[in-house]
Every structure is written in C-alpha cells, then in structure tokens.
Amino acid sequence: MTPEERETIDRGCIGITATNLNGGGNPLDSAEKIFGTFEQAHAAMEEKNNTLNWMARIPWFGERMAGKARYVVFAKMFWSNQDPDEKKRKNPDPKAFLPDPKTGEVDMTGYEYREQPGMVNFDYAFWDEASQSFWHANHMDYGDPADPMIVLQSTKEKFAAGYRDFDRTVYAIALANNYNPGLAAIASGRRGGH
C-alpha cells in the first residue's frame, strides 16, 4: 500500500470507497448512476460489465477499448434534510432524495453532507463482489488509540438495516480503476463479518 492510499483509507468509510474506485477523491463524483435499491444498482453494474467483457473479446483491439477497469457498486447512508439551519434540520425531509418512480434513480442535487443534528453525517460502503459484502468504517482515523478507526465487513442485509443517524440509503455504480477482487477475496477469508 502506498502512503497516498494509506492516507485515503484513513479518511474512514469514504476513504475505503475512494481507494477502491480511483485511489482518492469523492466517491459521489465518480458515480455514473445512483439508485434507491441495491438490486437496481447491481443490475446496472452487471449490464455495464457484460458490455465491457463483450468488447474485450473483440480480436486485436477489444481489450484496449474495454480496458481493465470494471463497474462496481457503492452505497451511501445519509440524512435527507440538508437545511443549513441546524434547528430546521432535526426532522427528515420526506420529499428529498427519493428514487424516480420510473427509473429508480436518485438525484443527489442539493446534497451538502449535512448531518442530522448531533449525529454522523454519512456512511459510505464499498460493495465487494468477491466476498459478497460491504466494507465500511466506524469513522475516520483520528489518531486516538482510545477511539480507533475500525474497518467493518457487513452483509448486504446488515448494512441495509442502517443506523439511527440516517434516513436514506442510495446505491451508486462507478467505474473502479483500483478495485482488485483477487485481493478482496484473500482479505475476506482472514476477517470476521459484521
């Protein structure tokens, strides 16, 4: 692991997702589509990857066209009410960040990373197809031995159950340039689940 990758992972759940996508940055910036359900996002991921895999089989130039990167799913839990006034933000916004009834897609325009007052502002999780689990963290690494960052491996069902800090969960697809499913499968064999 490079020092840059370690620094990104130390950002916590957002860092785990960012590292697997492109090595850094904001995962939402990499999202090509965002859905209200895991199933919709996973189906979109499979469709994109099937197309890339088909392209890669074209003799002579297919692999160069398709590249090595493949699509992945990542999730984000957050608070729907993004009012800048903390007092007005204590209740969820029943109309914000809902899936389109026809497409299932969620428009994240207006999302400002604001938390439910007194709670955590978000939880990102990277879906690892090799281990069939989400990888996320309790928080970033603050450098405090009494409160360390803990990396969590959760089943899809456990992650979807959510936390009281959040009232929305979305699932995005992105082209991942850094994801190595071979390493993920090795790592998942050595760790316990959550």
Image (cartoon, rainbow, N blue to C red):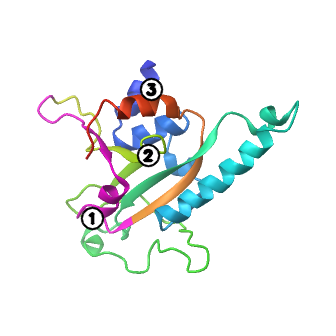
Give the x, y percent position of residue 15.
41, 38
Graded by Cα atoms within 10 Å as few (under 14), some (14 to 19) or many (20 or more), the crowding at tag 2 reads: many
Identify which amino acid the numbered label 1 is placed on: Gln
Q: In which quarter of the image is the N terminus?
A: top left
Mark toward the start of the polypeptide (1 vs 2)? 1
Mark drawn on residue 5: 3
30 or 181: nearer the viewer? 181
In this rendering, does residue 27 appear at all? Answer: yes
Q: Earlier in the sequence, mark 3 or mark 2?
A: 3
Magenta segment boundaries in residue numbering: 145-168
Give me the residue at 25% from left, 61% from top.
Answer: 163
Is residue 154 on the magenta stretch? Answer: yes
Q: In this view, does 28 lie above or below 94?
A: above
In the rendering, at what x and y percent does residue 46 appear?
A: 62, 53
* Whether residue 108 is visible: no
**122 or 43, nearer to the observer:** 43
Q: Mark 1 points at which residue?
A: 116
Q: Residue at x 61, y 74 (%)?
A: 103
Picture layout, residue 122 above or below residue 5: below
Q: Which of marks 1 and 3 is in front?
A: 3
Q: Which residue is identified by label 2?
A: 126
Is disc 3 in contact with disc 2, using a CB cutoff of under 8 Å? Answer: no
Q: Earlier in the sequence, mark 1 or mark 3?
A: 3
